[in-house]
Amino acid sequence: MIRIGILGYGNLGKGVENAVAHNADTQLVAIFTRRNPDSITPITKGVNVYKAEDIANYKNDIDVLILCGGSATDLPKQTPEVAKYFNVIDSFDTHANIPQHFQDVDNAAKQNNTLALISCGWDPGMFSLNRVYAESVLPGGATYTFWGKGVSQGHSDAIRRIKGVLDARQYTVPVESALEAVRSGKNPQLTTRQKHTRECFVVVEEGADKASIEKQIKEMPNYFADYDTTVNFISMEELKEKHNGIPHGGFVIRSGQTGEHDEYNNVIEYSLKLDSNPAFTSSVLVAYARAVYRMSKEGKTGCITVLDVAPSYLSPLSGEELRAKML
Amino acid sequence: MIRIGILGYGNLGKGVENAVAHNADTQLVAIFTRRNPDSITPITKGVNVYKAEDIANYKNDIDVLILCGGSATDLPKQTPEVAKYFNVIDSFDTHANIPQHFQDVDNAAKQNNTLALISCGWDPGMFSLNRVYAESVLPGGATYTFWGKGVSQGHSDAIRRIKGVLDARQYTVPVESALEAVRSGKNPQLTTRQKHTRECFVVVEEGADKASIEKQIKEMPNYFADYDTTVNFISMEELKEKHNGIPHGGFVIRSGQTGEHDEYNNVIEYSLKLDSNPAFTSSVLVAYARAVYRMSKEGKTGCITVLDVAPSYLSPLSGEELRAKML
């Protein structure tokens, strides 16, 4: 059994707990939290909840620690810190800061002979794999990533910060005609506006100025100004009834040419349709925990990403079984 | 530069030659053939063509030898034989015999400190990767592979062997309603007949008994009897004009559940749409030649498959570049 620890018990931490229960060779042994441990009742029976500050005391009890904090402030500090004691995995997803985060974690892990895998999940994660595979096997061509339909937590939060707004959900929606143009192999040049639209469902205070709120949303720089945005004002009841989930997904599509004169077109498409973004991310994290455990046993140390892991490490099946059943 | 050799100069061999030209870090240095070398004029300038029987003489001139023969009779003998002298890759695709072929090649490669990668291409190959990734990250669920729309060489050949048939093309076509049922997350049980149909375009001799030929096709065991098959009789001109290509492709779809009570459904879909089956297979082979070259330099020996190769080995980009641009 691979002994798993969780640091941080929000949506992602609970997702990891459920994903561990879906894998026969993994076992959850401890949850670490910055809250009062007594305030948490794990779903899994017999799992201890400890204070995050005491985590180093449990270094011999855990094979792989899965970090379930946020990329903005938690992981840049936490991952290098706990990599001193544990093999770790995180889902750091601020793409622009990955090189710096990698360096910080690599230093800590190498000095302490641990193995750390960062930026795991679906983007970065499964989508990254597919970008690299597709560009490698079709060197001439163009790659496109589309997201959605799905809830963007960051955009929903941005709407909630507007005065008069009580709650909001923002869906990122890929433009079907853009998807079709890409799939046709035309390698189109697409602007931000041509690739995605943004649909907002907003609950406001009684008497709020809806026209002003809609204008503030649509003109918000970075978040909405570059997109065609639709704003729907709904009741709190409707929001809770129809927009309570955290679905997401998307598409990685590469179109590229082969043949002596590039006469053959080829389209590689990978897509995800996920009822729950954090539940799927958690499921990916646990599969990679298996890989980290095995690679660590082989003596691998330092920081790696999903790009450095051979697929066979993710599966509970043996090499023989994989070749006989899956190849 | 990675020095590539090709053994066998048919559709696949020519495809590999073109794929090598699409990759800046690979160079074709030799073609080996069982035909008279003088009868072959390579597309690439300056490439020598040698007799297959003399291949061992060139063991120091080639970093990776790509075998481009057939799975029925060529590769089971050739791959273990040439793995004595070279790092090799083949596209052995008789799924049921992969374990035996692996063992034969592994023995030869281990005894001679070479590295061999077998069963590379798209199925087995890219589809295998996607089956393993999808089942690993979604352990609860069902996986489906659909092929087509594309030309099946084996089925076309089977039709050609019928008396009175001059030429034929057989297309394997996935059933759209089956694809939709799978994508919906219903995990349907599908029979062979429900997954694919077979479309045949047949040219017959003047005065041939079309009704009898159609019956022979539709009732042919293993090839057609278990499928809904359509037979179209056309002229040789139409066959050459409209059915001259070798397109193929297909879908790997996994639908699986996450959440405490399996309440979330998830669908992972990978698809290929290829204008030329051998040209794409060749392109995959050359990307994996890069991986074999690098892993061999690291001291890896024996037989491996695509499941044993980390994605980063396939890309000409460095680890730093991959993390900055692709993750």
Image: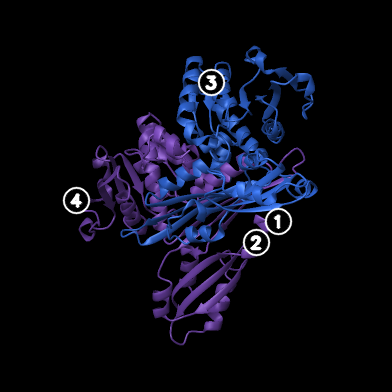
Chain colours: A blue, B purple
Looking at the rendered structure, the kind of residue marked 2 is: Ala
Q: Quadrant of residue A204?
A: top right
Q: Which residue, given by chain and number where applicable, does mark 3 sit on?
A: A80
> Can marks 4 and 1 be said to lie on one chain?
yes
Picture disc at residue B188: 1
Give the number of marks: 4
Q: Is residue B200 above or below residue B125?
A: below
What's the CA distance linking mark 2 and mark 4? 50 Å
> Dot 3: within a 10 Å radius of its alpha carbon, few (fewer than 14), some, or many (20 or more) residues?
many
Identified at 23% across, 50% down, the residue is: B50
Alpha carbon separation for disc pair 4 and 1 = 55 Å
B118 left or right of A177 in image: left
Instruction: Report which quarter residue B276 is drawn in.
Output: bottom left
- Residue of label 4: B46
Identify residue type, mark 1: Pro
Assign a secondary structure to mark 1: loop
Q: Residue at x 69, y 50 (%)?
A: A210
Q: Quadrant of residue A39?
A: top right
Judged by depth in the image, the label closer to the viewer, 2 or 3, is 3
Whether label 4 touches label 1, CB < 8 Å? no
Dot 2 or dot 4: first in sequence order is 4
Foreground: disc 1 or disc 3: 3
Using the rendered image of the protein, determine whether residue A247 is visible from the camera's viewpoint.
no
Instruction: Assign a secondary structure to mark 4.
Output: loop
Of residues A137 and B47, the one nearer the viewer is A137
Residue placed under numbered mark 2 in the picture:
B178
Q: Residue furthest bottom?
A: B207
- Identity, as a three-letter code, of the amino acid under mark 3: Pro
Res B206 visible: yes
